Image (spheres, rainbow, N blue to C red):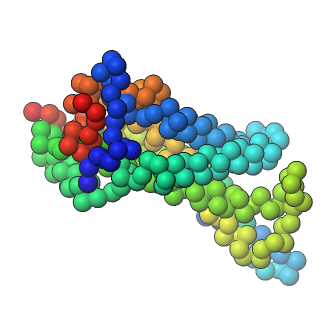
């Protein structure tokens, strides 16, 4: 499957750069990143002994992240489309090729990905599942705290349901620790810096495009 | 190390409270191991361009 639908086609700037992430996508990424870091800090620092009034910051940040994710889902479903993130048979072939190249210690035959590599798609989908789990369970847990809009009701659901809800919320939060660490590590690796720059400034150069991407799988404006 | 936090209700029955926070260090440790493992993989095993 190619990333050739109109919504996923990269545009070129006047300077001949290839636009990888438009402004609204970058804003969503960094807003989500800030929310996740605040949520992790407000969740885990009090457990580690750093005491402060974390509950209000936590649920309000959760609502901001919920709004951002809903915006992203609507934008992807109705405007951008799913093609560039879709896992297909070409991705399976890419994984086989990487394993084969690793065993042979020869990267010369490795296929170039489209806009996103299979690893980037995988980490996106992993974050999607884990963040959605925290948002759904966190949304349910809002019933147990007082907000300006409602009084707490801890008896809304049976204890067993609350238990499973808290386990899922906690497990997803714990997974986020590992995933955020990995994500930051890969973003800072020298060979991945172009993707970090693209997420900050939006573009990659023509040379980077030619070196890292298959122009048949990610068709950009000529 | 416990996987879950549990308490007892007024009837003495076990009530699930959530994941054990002892696991914070485990997940942080897994992250460190994966990062070091990948860095070593890139250094030693990763296929080279010929």
Q: Is residue A218 visible?
A: yes
Residue A103 x, y percent position in the rendering: 16, 49
Coordinates of residue A2 in the picture (x, y in percent): 26, 49
A188 or A142, which is in the foreground? A142
* Between B43 and A81, the one nearer to me in the picture: A81
Left or right: where B13 falls relative to B43: right
Image: B22 above or below B16: above
Q: Position of residue A199 (x, y in %)?
A: 45, 32
Vertical side of A154 occupied by A201: above or below: above
Q: Residue at x 45, y 42 (%)?
A: A182
Residue farthest to the top?
A15
Tally of marks: 0
Q: Residue at x 12, y 46 (%)?
A: A104
Decide: is A137 above or below A108: below
Residue A189 placement: quadrant: top left
Residue at 59% from the left image edge and 48% from the top image edge: A71
In the rendered image, residue B16, in percent from the top left (x then y), is placed at 71, 71
- The N terminus of chain A: image quadrant: bottom left
């Amino acid at each position: 499957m190619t990333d050739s639908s109109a919504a996923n086609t990269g545009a070129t700037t006047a300077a001949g750069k290839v636009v990888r992430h438009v402004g609204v996508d970058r804003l969503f990424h960094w807003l989500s990143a800030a929310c996740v870091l605040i949520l992790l800090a407000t969740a885990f620092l009090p457990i580690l002994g750093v005491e402060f009034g974390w509950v209000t910051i936590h649920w309000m940040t959760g609502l901001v992240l919920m709004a951002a994710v809903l915006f992203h889902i609507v934008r992807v479903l109705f405007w951008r489309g799913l093609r560039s993130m879709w896992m297909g048979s070409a991705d399976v072939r890419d994984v086989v090729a990487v394993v084969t190249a690793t065993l042979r210690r020869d990267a010369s035959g490795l296929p170039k990905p489209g806009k996103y590599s299979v690893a980037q798609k995988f980490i996106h989908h992993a974050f999607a599942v884990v963040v959605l789990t925290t948002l759904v369970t966190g949304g349910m847990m809002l019933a147990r705290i007082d907000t300006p809009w409602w009084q707490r009701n801890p008896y809304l659901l049976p204890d067993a349901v609350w238990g499973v809800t808290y386990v899922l919320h906690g497990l997803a939060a714990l997974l986020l620790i590992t995933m955020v660490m990995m994500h930051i590590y890969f973003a800072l690796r020298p060979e991945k810096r172009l993707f970090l720059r693209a997420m900050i400034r939006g573009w990659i150069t023509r040379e980077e495009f030619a070196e890292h991407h298959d122009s048949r799988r990610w068709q950009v404006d000529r | 190390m416990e996987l879950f936090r549990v308490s007892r209700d007024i009837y003495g029955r076990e009530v699930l409270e959530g994941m054990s926070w002892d696991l914070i260090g485990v997940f942080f440790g897994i992250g460190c191991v994966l990062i070091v493992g990948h860095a070593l993989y890139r250094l030693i095993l990763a296929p080279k361009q010929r």
